[in-house]
Image (cartoon, coloured by chain):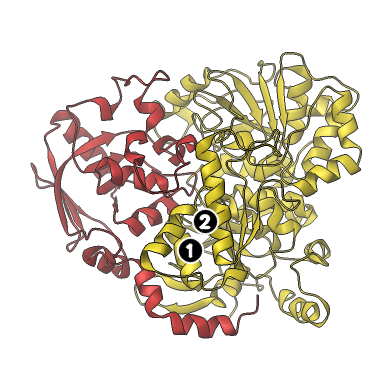
Amino acid sequence: MKKTLFDKVWDSHVVRRIDQGPDVLFIDRHMIHEVTSPVAFLGLKNRNLSVLYPERTFATADHNTPTLNQHLPVADPLSRNQLKALEENATAHGISYWGLGHQKNGIVHVVGPEYGITQPGATIVCGDSHTSTHGAFGAIAFGIGTSEVEMVLATQCIMQPKPKKMRITINGKLNHGVTPKDVALYIISKLTTSGATGYFVEYAGEVFQQLSMEGRMTVCNLSIEMGARGGMIAPDEKTFTYIKGREFTPKGADWDKAMKYWSTLHTDEGAAFDKEITFDGSDIDPMITFGTNPGMGMSITKAIPKAELMEGGAATYKKSLDYMGYSEGETMLGKPIDYVFIGSCTNGRIEDFRAFAQVVKGHKKNENVTAWLVPGSHKVLNAIKEEGLLEIFEAADFKLREPGCSACLAMNDDKIPAGKYAVSTSNRNFEGRQGPGARTLLASPLVAAAAAITGKITDPRTLI
Amino acid sequence: MAYDSFHILQSTAVPLPIENVDTDQIIPARFLKATERKGFGDNLFRDWRYNQDDTPKTDFVLNNATYSGKILIGGHNFGSGSSREHAAWAIYDYGFRCVVSSFFADIFRNNCLNIGVLPVQVSPSFLATLFHAIETDPSAELLVDLPQQTVTLKATGQSEPFEINSYKKENLLNGYDDIDYLNNIKPEIVNFAAQTPL
């Protein structure tokens, strides 16, 4: 029978199928962080259960960590307590733990691939919806709730009905100044935030083949923002080159054996999807969002659509524009902004900082803009220094912070003040996401950089 | 162990006719710092419910004494965004046992089912009927019947069936959860793991 990439990986991990119910799905690798794991460990304790396979779980602290002075004790007692709980739980159960200050520390979806925990054909879960990132390697990766974190700790399995399958194909070539983030925001703007709910997405076509692994991670990361459980891309030479030799990838004969399996991980010619969607890569412009969900995005050169043209209720749409302080029909170009945030599991990788540097090189940060540059991990931080990007940033009056999720969800002190506009390379522009009352404009690192030096929404193509 | 069982729920409902209600609204990230499952109901819809000086926003439905009950009715695509189970916990802790909408985000729906909150998906037109009925008469009661898989507007008898897979239905009727099930098949899992290299 002809199978999709998703079928191949899912079916090979089914321990048991329940009639009229979910599949019992075996999880190869599980990542945990401080926010969604403590209650799961408490659940284990209450049921008197242990962690079945501690070597399959990896812990890192990221959501709730400061991005300045990480060598000092964490000031907020609640955050400190949560970080301590992660450390104690990981240590007590023999789980590898990359806490604050550890050289391997960083955002869970950045460090997983960096150390080869993420591999093709694997099932990967984490109590975080952006676990879909790891699908860039041909893995089935998705976010789970805390009850499921407890299940994986206790039994290395979760129970889920098999999702439907969607393929999004984009052929053609991307235009100058169009990045993987723009591709993802474009798809979400077309599908809406619920357009892929119930589906697992495979991204196919020339555009995705041509993307770097970092770019593929950015696209897969944002799968959840169209409602999909996850997204994946068939592994190819780029994938294998990226993971070879990393700490947790197979070596020697094991590598050869793995490669044999991995080379079968593609959708068979003629395999059926429940839904197929096709776009043309050349139709995509640099994107920006203007509302309070990631589906409310458009080409940076366009005007904010009229309510009557939007799907769904006009009342919700108007509430959203009111929150943003924008009106229907306005153009986004030239609108003033206050903050710029580059970082997160969406755009906190080295390629993103290279893109940011490409724009800001030789310019100065606009004096009205507060910019937070937050690498996704220590490895990214080190690469920024080694590649000379830090000098470019400093010459342009930018400062670099320490790794973590930071202003993406503003659990730590990195909060955008109420009413202020932030051009952000992160993944969600929900009301208050970056701080109570904060107004988020999602965009690529190029758009963020252009805004940082001009103090307003600017088409990056005029600067590169 | 797990959670309260769910059979038949008859209650008034709280209407929230807003679409794409995301989990950041249900419980903002800054309230996710607890290490125990306690007190999340106090911060349910925090930023829609309270001003920044912590005074209640009088126009928000949870601050309107006219509406109460164990059923929350939300607009299309309820629970999108983050996987935080804290959102489902907050809804439960506040006192809701059932959420009705015309469409739910995947992870949120799963999280609800895993803690014993019943997500009931109805057609957009029935959702509109419910919103209208409650707006007209806030004391209107709904009857959510899990064994029959129906939701009924008591006053008029208007009713719609809803879907739930039979495994999850059985769990909710008995208050079992997935960990109970998985624990019972551990030998099968261990066997599977032995053939699945890390």
Q: Position of residue A266 (x, y in %)?
A: 68, 70
Q: Which numbered disc covers residue A305?
A: none
The residue at 66%/15% (across/down) is A336
A55 w.r.t. B185: above or below: above
The residue that mark 1 highlights is: A163
The crowd level at tag 2 (other Cα within 10 Å; few <14, some 14-19, many 20+) is many
Q: What residue type is disc 2 on?
A: Arg
Query: Which one is nearer the viewer's eye here, B17 or A91?
Result: A91
Residue B108 appears anywhere in the view: yes
Q: Is residue B119 left or right of residue A336?
A: left
A155 w.r.t. A371: above or below: below
Q: Position of residue B194 (x, y in %)?
A: 58, 84
Label 1 residue SS: loop
Look at the image and tell me in which quarter the N terminus of chain A lies.
bottom right
First along the sequence among labels 2 and 1:
1
Q: Is residue B112 left or right of residue A334?
A: left
The residue at 55%/63% (across/down) is A92
Q: What residue type is disc 1 on?
A: Pro
Q: Position of residue B71 (x, y in %)?
A: 22, 43
The residue at 59%/61% (across/down) is A91
The residue at 33%/66% (across/down) is B177
Look at the image and tell me in which quarter the C terminus of chain A lies.
top right
Check chain identity for marks 2 and 1: say if they share one.
yes
The residue that mark 2 highlights is: A229
Q: Position of residue A10 (x, y in %)?
A: 55, 71
Chain with yellow colouring: A
State yes or no: discs 2 and 1 in contact (Cβ < 8 Å): yes
What colour denotes chain B?
red
Query: Which one is nearer the viewer's eye here, A314 or B180?
Result: B180
Q: Chain of mark 2?
A: A
Q: Chain of mark 1?
A: A
